[in-house]
Image: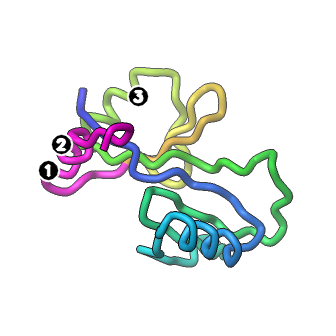
Amino acid sequence: MTRGYLEHVAIRVQSLTPHLAFFRDVFGMEIRDEKMIGGLRQVWVTGGIQFIEDPDFIGPEGRFAHLGIFVEDLDAALDAALSHDVTVLPKGRNWLLLPDGLEVELDQAQGDAVARALALDARNG
């Protein structure tokens, strides 16, 4: 077993502009990364949200895309995951589909990032 933490939640939206403005203006969440992936503009903001702009998306069904989990030891986490009823997705060996359709992306954390993240008490400051 290895330890990990939720690094981001990926959400599909029809347009990034109003969402980025809302989360910036209300919560101070600024853009920390932006990429084009699969022809879709994707933006990560502080606070752990990844917005995926899909002009054809009509919510709310299918809005949630995946959970991004950073782990201390990617190989150990994948070994543990494969002992469960999961499917490795074509996106890569670190993309897993659970039996009920939940998609999980595992990524290797750097240094002591997992220990630091797990030491935070998000509910109590």
Q: Amino acid at mark 1?
A: Asp
Q: Residue furthest top?
A: 84
Question: Which labelled disc corresponds to residue 115?
Answer: 2
Binning the other alpha carbons within 10 Å of mark 2 as few (below 14), some (14 to 19) or many (20 upward) gives some
Looking at the rendered structure, the kind of residue marked 2 is Ala
Q: Do the residues under discs 2 and 1 have CB atoms within 8 angstroms?
A: yes
- Residue 121 forms part of the magenta stretch: yes
Number of numbered discs: 3
Q: Is residue 29 left or right of residue 42?
A: left
The x, y position of residue 21, in whole percent, is: 62, 75
Q: Nearer the viewer, mark 3 or mark 2?
A: 2
Q: Residue at x 23, y 45 (%)?
A: 114
Label 1 to label 3, Cα distance in Å? 25 Å
In the image, residue 8 lies in the stretch drawn in magenta:
no
Q: Quadrant of residue 4?
A: top left
Give the answer, above or below, for where 16 lies relative to 91: below
The magenta stretch is 107-125
Q: Secondary structure at mark 1?
A: loop
Numbered badge on residue 82: 3
Secondary structure under the numbered disc 2 in the rendered image: helix
Choose the circle earlier in sequence order: 1 or 3: 3
Q: Which mark is residue 112?
A: 1
Q: Secondary structure at mark 3?
A: helix
Q: Which percent across, then down, holds residue 24? A: 54, 72
Q: Of residues 16 and 24, which is closer to you in this image? A: 24
Residue 13 higher or lower than 84, as above or below = below
Q: Identify which amino acid the numbered label 3 is placed on.
A: Leu
